[in-house]
Image (cartoon, rainbow, N blue to C red):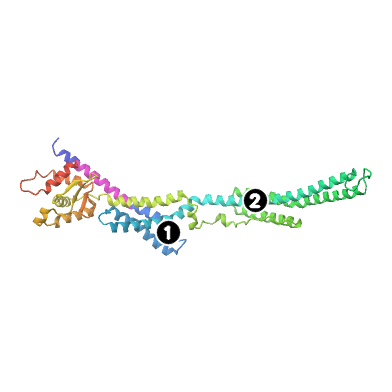
Amino acid sequence: MSSSTPWRIGGWLNLIQTTFVGLLRVLSVPIVLGLSVASGYTTYYGLSYFITPWIALTVTIAVQSIVVICSLEIAAMHFRANPGRFISILLSLVVALTVSITFSYFKFYEFSERESILLDRGARLEKDIGQYLEGVVALKSGLASEHRKRIETASRETKQAFLSAAPGMAGQKVGKGKTWSYFNEILGSEQGRLKALESQLQPLDHAVIDTRTSLLKFSSATQDNAAYLGLVENFQKLVVEADQIASSHGRSPVPAPRIAPFREFSRQMTPSFDMWKNISWFAFACAAMVDFFTLILSYRLETTAPGPLSPHEKNLAFEGLRQFSQFRVNENNELEFSLERTELERARRVSEWHRMFTVAFLLNRGYLRKKSRRVVEFAPNLYPIIAERLRHIGPAQPGEGATRDGLAEAMRQKFHV
C-alpha cells in the first residue's frame, strides 16, 4: 500500500461525510418549514379567538419567523463575542416561543381534553339531577312518614280508648264507646289521608322513574339530541309534580338544578385562559414539542458545516489560516487560535487583510465558530481539509515564518495528521 492510500481513503471519507451532512441539511429545510407551518396553524387557531383573523395571521407569521431566525442567529454566535446582541436575540426567542406555545396549547387542549370535558359535563348533569331526585324522594318519604306517624298515634289512642286507658276515662267500661268512636274516626281520617297521599304521589313516582330512565339513556349517548330533549321534558314534568306536592303540603320546594341546553354537549370548545387553571400537561407537552423540534433543527441547520469547498476555496482557507501562529487545543478538544497579531507581527506591520478575509469567509460558511471577540475555533469538517493540504507540503525551510509550523503542530496535537 502506497503512502498516499490513507490520504485517499481519508479524502473519500471526508467526501462521504460532507455529502451525508449536506443531504441532512437539505432534508432539514423542508422539515423545519413543515414544523413551522404546523406550529403556525395551532398558534393561529388560538390567536384567532382573541383578535381578528388577519392580525392573528400576521402575528403568527412573525412569531414563527422569529423562532427560526433567532435559532439560526444563536447557533452562529457565542455569548462572549457579543453579549448584548446574544441576550437580545435570546429574549426575542423566549418571547416568540412563549406566544407560540401559549396559543398552540389551546388547540392541543381542545383535541386532548374534549372527550374528558364532555364526560365531566355529563357527570355533572347526572350528579345535579341525581341530587334533585334524592331531594324529591326525601320529600315524598317525609310526607309519607309524617302521615304514618299520625296513623300510629291515632291507632294507639284508639286502643287506649277501647281499653279505657286514655286520660279522663278512669272508671269507664272496656269496649267501644263515645271516646273510642272519636279516636277511631280520627284514625280512619288519617288512613284516608295516607291513601290520598299515595294516590297523589303516583304521578310523582312515574316522573321519577321516567327521569331516571331518560338520564340513563342520555348517559349512553351524549350526542343524541332526541335523548337529551326527552330527558329535559321528563325532568320538567318531575319539577312540576314535585313543586305541586310541596306546595299542597306546605313544604318548601326542592331546589331544581339548571339544565344546560344541548349545545353545551355538541358545540366546539372556546379557548380561554381558564384552560391554564386546570392545565393538561399532555397538551402542553404537545404544544412545546413542535416548537422544540423547530428550534433544535434550526439550530443544527446553522451549526452543521455546509457543502464541500471548491479546490480554490480550500487553498484560500489553508493559505489564510497558516498566517496565524497562536494555535492551541481547547477544553472542547477543538483547535482554536487568536485573531490578534503578535508583537513580532505588529513590529513587522504584517497586513491582516488576507487572513481576516479568510476567517470571515470560513465563519460565514460554517467551517469556523467564533468563541469570543478574539478567538475562533475549528468546525469538525475543517480538519480533513487542512490535513489534506499539510501532507502536500514539506518541512519548514530555514528562514520561513513559523506560522505554518504552528498550524502543523496544532494539527498533530489534534491527531489528524
The image quadrant that residue 67 belongs to is bottom left
Side of 274 relative to 245 (left or right): left
Instruction: Please name whichever residue, 94 or 50, is drawn nearer the observer in this view of the structure.
Output: 94
At which x and y percent is residue 258? 62, 57
Residue 352 in the image, given as x and y percentages of width and height: 14, 56
Q: Nearer the viewer, residue 219 or 185?
A: 185
* Residue 44, numbered label: 1
Q: Kindly tell me whether residue 69 is visible in this rendering.
A: no
Q: Position of residue 194 (x, y in %)?
A: 80, 50
- Visible in this render: residue 101? yes
Task: Give the overall secondary structure of the magenta segment.
Answer: helix
Report which residue position mark 2 lands on.
131
**Is residue 20 in the magenta section?**
yes
Q: How many marks?
A: 2
User: Which span of residues is magenta-colored?
Assistant: 10-29
Camera-nearest residue between 252 and 163: 163
Q: Reply yes or no: does residue 331 show up in magenta.
A: no
Please state if 361 lies on the left or on the right of 253 as rendered: left
Quarter of the figure with the N terminus: top left
Q: Nearer the viewer, residue 25 or 235?
A: 235
Does the residue at mark 2 contact the one at mark 1 (Cβ under 8 Å)?
no
Callout 1 amino acid: Tyr
For the point 66% across and 52% down, which residue is it?
132
* For marks 2 and 1 on the same chain, the one whose residue lies earlier in the sequence: 1
